[in-house]
Amino acid sequence: MLTDELSKAIAELEEQQVADLVKERLAKGVTPLEIVNSLQQGMAEAGVRFETGEYFLGELIMCGEIMQDSMVVLEPLLTGSNAEYKGNIVMGTVKGDIHDLGKNIVVMLLKGSGYNVIDLGVDVPKEKFIEAIKEFKAPLVGMSVLLTGCQESMKETIEAIRAAGLDCIILIGGNYIDEVVKDYVGADFSAQAATDGVKIAEEIFGVA
């Protein structure tokens, strides 16, 4: 059950209320990162409603659009907050999945935290992940997935990266990702919120 007013508003698709609450919280000095977290929790709830049949695809898309509108306001405040270079991270949505909103938010937060993010986009084949890891010598790879049916694709990609002998840490993210999925596909870390991705990156790169 959502207790945060902003999380509830986006889950209920209250476009104007979301816009007002974002402005109000910024004016009160709430950090942009905290606001993104609240929005993400609401989006996750909309995802659950879609999975259970309470919401249709139209509602899910609308929720994503409200989130994107909010990010237009929040993005400039997130980037540049710490622009010092910290390292390379390869990111992409796995083959068969074309959802990129969650991935895009993580990419933006990581860039704002000073990482060089190589964003491979959506529906990314395993070969493309391997090429990018080799080219940029990336110690961290982030894989995003929204569709449960693409779990096997994620597993195959991780197996291919390991088989290629690449020494990198693999972080997976998505609404339904948990420890069970992480262990099944063979990833090192899992994240549900975009802010978790930044925390994990900081752990891996040893950033205080």
Image (cartoon, grey):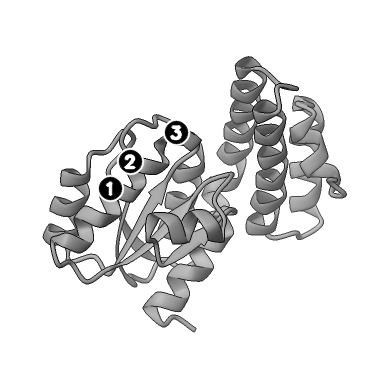
Give the Cα distance between marks 2 and 1.
Answer: 5 Å
**Position of residue 95 in the picture relative to residue 127 (left or right):** right
Identity of the residue drawn at 22% across and 49% down: 129
**Badge 1: residue crowd in 10 Å (few <14, some 14–19, many ≥20):** some
- Identify which amino acid the numbered label 2 is placed on: Ser
Residue appearing at x 71%, y 28% in the figure: 52
Q: Nearer the viewer, residue 108 or 163?
A: 163
Q: Residues within 10 Å of mark 3 (few under 14, many from 20)?
A: few
Image-quadrant location for residue 151: top left
Would you say the residues marked 2 and 1 are in contact, meaning their CB atoms lie under 8 Å apart? yes
Amino acid beneath label 3: Gly
In the image, taking residue 163 as reference, residue 97 lies left or right, namely: right
- As drawn, the label of residue 156 is 1
From the image, tell me which residue sits under label 3: 149
Pointer 2 local density, CA inside 10 Å: few below 14, some 14–19, many at least 20:
many
Q: Is residue 134 left or right of residue 33?
A: left
Residue bearing mark 2: 153
Q: Secondary structure at mark 1?
A: helix
Amino acid type of disc 1?
A: Glu
> In front: 34, or 61?
61
- Residue 101 image position (x, y, % from top left): 50, 37
Image coordinates of residue 19 in percent, x first then y, are: 74, 34
Q: CA distance from mark 1 to mark 3?
A: 13 Å
Tell me the SS state at disc 3: helix
Instruction: Indicate the position of residue 78 as horizontal and vertical percent values.
Output: 54, 55
Query: In this view of the protein, can residue 93 be seen by the observer?
Result: no
Residue 104 seen by the camera: yes
Quadrant location of the N terminus? top right
Q: Is residue 63 above or below residue 161?
A: above
